Image: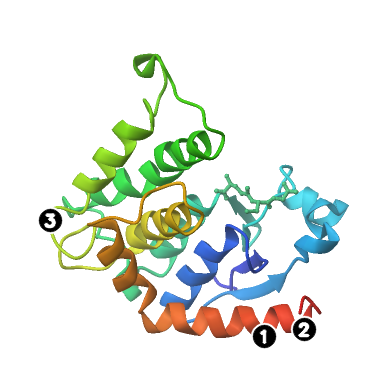
């Protein structure tokens, strides 16, 4: 891999997770803005990259990666020297992938159920069970320390933490412990502060204010 990855991003969308990941890595991506309010994610050029017509997307030396969690996992490995993924032979890789993929597979659909005031009456037949089961499991992920991997921040926290933060910000999940302390710790990170400043500047450039 030689060139810089191109990250397609728009503020106030799920691409914020990957924008944060890029910042944690030291701004390694060439960020291209897709104006969500103009529906530019449905332009033919972008749909050729992501047939879903959804953000985020990443292109790296001709390789396309979509899905925020996959992009974060990919970038963490592509820039492994930055230390945001446990090494291939490290047993911590289990918890790392487990909770990174728990976010889109379980937290996201549980959050949507709560928004839609819907409850799965037969949780055994559904991959994520129901929102109560998801919330209890998500709390167990934070039992070992300040981060998913205990005392080490990783890309799993970027994905799990931003999904959890979104769920609480929009009132799907209660603001309760250990979620509040965990997300406050993450949102105080310098990389998140830089993203907030950059996103504010992007929105100004897009004329969103
Ligand atoms: N499963 C995708 C979801 C991406 C997604 O839903 N993106 C929304 C923004 S938050 C989007 O681009 N929606 C635009 C549209 O569908 O037109 C991921 O995790 O990356």
Q: Where is residue 158 in the image (x, y as percent from the top left)?
A: 39, 63
Residue shown at the point (40%, 54%) measured from the top left: 164
Q: Do the residues labelled 2 and 3 touch (CB within 8 Å)?
A: no
Crowd rating for badge 1 (residues with CA inside 10 Å; few <14, some 14–19, many 20+): few
Q: Which residue lies furthest to the left in this view?
A: 144
Task: Determine the residue positioned at 26% across, 54% down.
Answer: 88
The residues bearing labels 2 and 1 have C-alpha atoms spaced at a distance of 6 Å
Q: For mark 1, what is the residue?
A: 201
Q: Marks 1 and 3, how far apart in space?
A: 37 Å
Direction from residue 185 to residue 118 in the image, left or right: right
Residue 73 visible in image: no
The residue that appears at 63% across and 65% down in the rendered structure is 12
Disc 3 secondary structure class: loop
Residue appearing at x 79%, y 49% in the figure? 48
- Quarter of the image for the C terminus: give it: bottom right
Side (left or right) of 125 relative to 170:
left
Residue 145 image point, x, y percent: 14, 62
Q: Using the rendered view, name the quadrant where residue 14 is placed.
A: bottom right
Position above or below: 128 against 95: above
Corner quadrant of residue 98: top left
Q: Name the residue tied to disc 2.
A: 205
Q: Which of 160 and 70 is in front in this view?
A: 160
Give the SS element for disc 1.
Answer: helix
Instruction: Tell me whether circle 2 and circle 1 mark residues in contact (CB < 8 Å).
Output: yes
The spot of residue 8 in percent (x, y) is 67, 64
Give whichever of discs 2 and 3 has the lower sequence position: 3
Would you name the residue on which mark 3 appears?
A: 144
Residue 193 visible in the displayed image: yes
User: Would you say 104 lies left or right of 58 here?
Assistant: left
């Amino acid at each position: 891999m030689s060139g810089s990855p191109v990250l397609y991003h728009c503020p106030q969308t799920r691409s914020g997770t990957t924008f944060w990941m890029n910042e944690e890595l030291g701004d390694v991506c060439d960020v291209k803005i897709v104006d969500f309010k103009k529906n530019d994610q449905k332009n033919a050029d972008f749909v050729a990259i992501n047939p879903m017509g959804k953000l985020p997307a990443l292109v790296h030396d001709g390789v396309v990666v979509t899905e925020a969690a996959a992009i974060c996992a990919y970038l963490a490995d592509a820039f492994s020297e930055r230390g945001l993924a446990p090494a291939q032979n490290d047993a911590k890789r289990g918890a790392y992938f487990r909770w990174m993929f728990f976010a889109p597979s379980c937290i996201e659909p549980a959050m949507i159920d709560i928004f839609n005031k819907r409850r799965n009456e037969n949780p055994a037949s559904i991959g994520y069970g129901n929102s109560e089961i998801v919330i209890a499991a998500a709390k167990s992920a934070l039992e070992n320390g300040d981060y998913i991997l205990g005392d080490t921040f990783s890309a799993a926290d970027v994905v799990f933490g931003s999904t959890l933060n979104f769920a609480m910000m929009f009132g799907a999940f209660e603001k309760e412990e250990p979620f509040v302390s965990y997300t406050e710790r993450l949102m105080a990170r310098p990389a998140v502060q830089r993203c907030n400043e950059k996103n504010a500047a992007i929105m100004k450039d897009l004329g969103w204010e």
